[in-house]
């Protein structure tokens, strides 16, 4: 009976987290569809690069991310310490956003869009620390429910306002408003009872979070950059319409890293426990199953992309992308490679090999900047595809080799002990 209840809880967590995370991750897809059809391809390009920049700034707010919080085995740092650290990083993100807006070359229209998108991301980063608390208490289903409600309201209001005003700035204003509404009406009543009133914030622990997770934060920022480096090269060497086209093509590919997160999210607690108990075989089995699922899903996605991907995108966005069939296929392949690397780096996070990850991200980030600049400047649109394949391939190679080296070291150390 106890096992049945446990299995039902895992299933409930998995279903709600999958549905909620899917809708949340597809927000930008629905936004881009609406913008392309209502505002045009140029506005779609502006939104694509601006939401990417807001995503980079979001890394400053989320800092070490949810994984470090929920894989904190010793529980020496309390939930309120993580909450306090997140408040400070969210404030830092807003300050950095203002600086970026002041110094960047965007026009006033694009600056207002960036401001509202960044406010939205800052609120989401703040809420994420509550999600970590719930997930650590095996209440991932509540997180999923919150994401479902928020995503549906966000998409509906954004599209409605954009249809009425046909103005991207006004539509983006709705995003932080909805996030705040859901936070106060749905999230806080369910989160606050799960936070200990006896806990007190320790400035020493807050500092320990920043110090201990700095390399992971920097690595995450570099990862986000390496995924989007070609977009910044497009912005510099091409134009907003091309940005919009590749924003559309990249959207289906973003399903693949999302799928990897779906596979791993419900098992992170299990992986952490297995690592704590030195159950290497169990960890390897989970890792291998996840990778094979990703490869299988990636093969199916690539075949679908080749045969019907472009006609479907043409219909949805009302633009002619017929000449971009192979672009879509190769970008899908690149993102399959990235998803595999994501599994490897997640294992490294559980191993707490943060500095090794940072070294990977730094090296690949530099390579991403060089490849994107050289290839796109030299080969224009064709260079975009080459850049993605090279960047993701090198990233996966380094992540896989580093994970294997660290695995052998830990097994050997455990055998000696």
Image (tube, grey):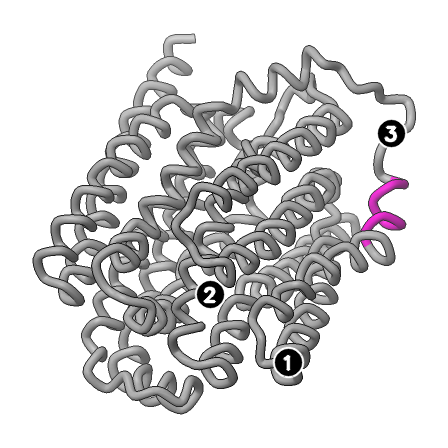
Q: Nearer the viewer, residue 32 or 396?
A: 32
| Circle nearer the N terminus (2, 3) | 2
Quadrant holding the C terminus? top left
SS for callout 2:
helix
Q: Say which of marks 2 and 1 sits in front.
A: 1
Pointer 2 and pointer 1: residues touching (CB < 8 Å)? no
Locate residue 329: give its quadrant.
Answer: bottom left
Mark 3 closeness class: few <14, some 14–19, many ≥20 residues within 10 Å: few
Q: Which residues are magenta?
A: 187-193
Is residue 135 rendered to the left or right of residue 346? right
Locate residue 402: give its quadrant.
Answer: top left
Is residue 194 rendered to the left or right of residue 179? right
Q: Which residue is mark 3?
A: 196
Is residue 412 rendered to the left or right of residue 168? left
Q: Which residue is mark 1?
A: 165
Q: Which residue is mark 2?
A: 47
**Separation of disc 2 and disc 3 at Cα?**
41 Å
The reply to whether residue 113 is in sight is yes
The answer to if 189 sits in the magenta stretch is yes
């Amino acid at each position: 009976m106890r096992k049945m209840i446990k299995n039902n809880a895992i299933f409930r967590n998995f279903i709600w987290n999958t549905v909620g995370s899917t809708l949340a991750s597809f927000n930008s897809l629905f936004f881009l569809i609406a913008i392309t059809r209502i505002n045009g391809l140029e506005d779609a390009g502006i939104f694509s690069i601006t939401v990417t920049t807001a995503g980079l700034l979001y890394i400053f707010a989320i800092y070490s991310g949810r994984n470090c919080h929920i894989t904190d085995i010793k529980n020496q740092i309390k939930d309120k310490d993580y909450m306090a650290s997140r408040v400070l990083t969210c404030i830092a993100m807003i300050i950095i956003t203002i600086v970026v807006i002041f110094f960047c070359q965007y026009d006033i229209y694009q600056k207002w869009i960036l401001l509202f998108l960044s406010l939205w991301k800052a609120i989401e980063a703040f809420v994420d620390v509550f999600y970590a608390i719930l997930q650590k208490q095996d209440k991932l289903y509540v997180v999923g429910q919150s994401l479902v409600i928020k995503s549906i309201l966000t998409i509906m209001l954004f599209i409605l306002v954009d249809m009425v005003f046909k103005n991207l700035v006004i539509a983006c204003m709705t995003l932080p408003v909805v996030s705040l509404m859901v936070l106060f009406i749905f999230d806080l009543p369910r989160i606050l009872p799960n936070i200990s009133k006896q806990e007190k914030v320790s400035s020493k622990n807050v500092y320990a979070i920043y110090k201990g997770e700095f390399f992971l934060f920097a690595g995450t920022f570099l990862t986000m950059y390496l995924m989007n480096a070609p977009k910044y090269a497009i912005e510099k060497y091409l134009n907003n319409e091309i940005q919009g086209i590749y924003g559309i093509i990249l959207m289906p590919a973003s399903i693949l890293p999302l799928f990897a997160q779906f596979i791993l999210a419900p098992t992170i607690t299990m992986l952490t426990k297995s690592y704590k108990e030195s159950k290497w075989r169990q960890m390897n089995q989970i890792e291998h199953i996840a990778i094979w699922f990703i490869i299988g899903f990636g093969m199916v996605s690539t075949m679908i992309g080749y045969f019907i991907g472009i006609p479907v995108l043409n219909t949805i966005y009302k633009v002619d992308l017929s000449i971009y069939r192979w672009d879509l296929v190769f970008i899908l392949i690149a993102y399959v490679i990235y998803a595999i690397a994501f599994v490897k780096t997640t294992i490294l996070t559980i191993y707490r090999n943060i500095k090794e990850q940072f070294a990977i991200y730094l090296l690949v980030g530099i390579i991403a900047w060089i490849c994107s600049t050289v290839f796109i400047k030299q080969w224009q649109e064709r260079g975009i595809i080459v850049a993605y394949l090279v960047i993701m391939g090198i990233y996966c190679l380094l992540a896989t080799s580093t994970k294997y080296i660290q695995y052998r070291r830990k097994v050997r150390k455990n055998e000696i002990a």
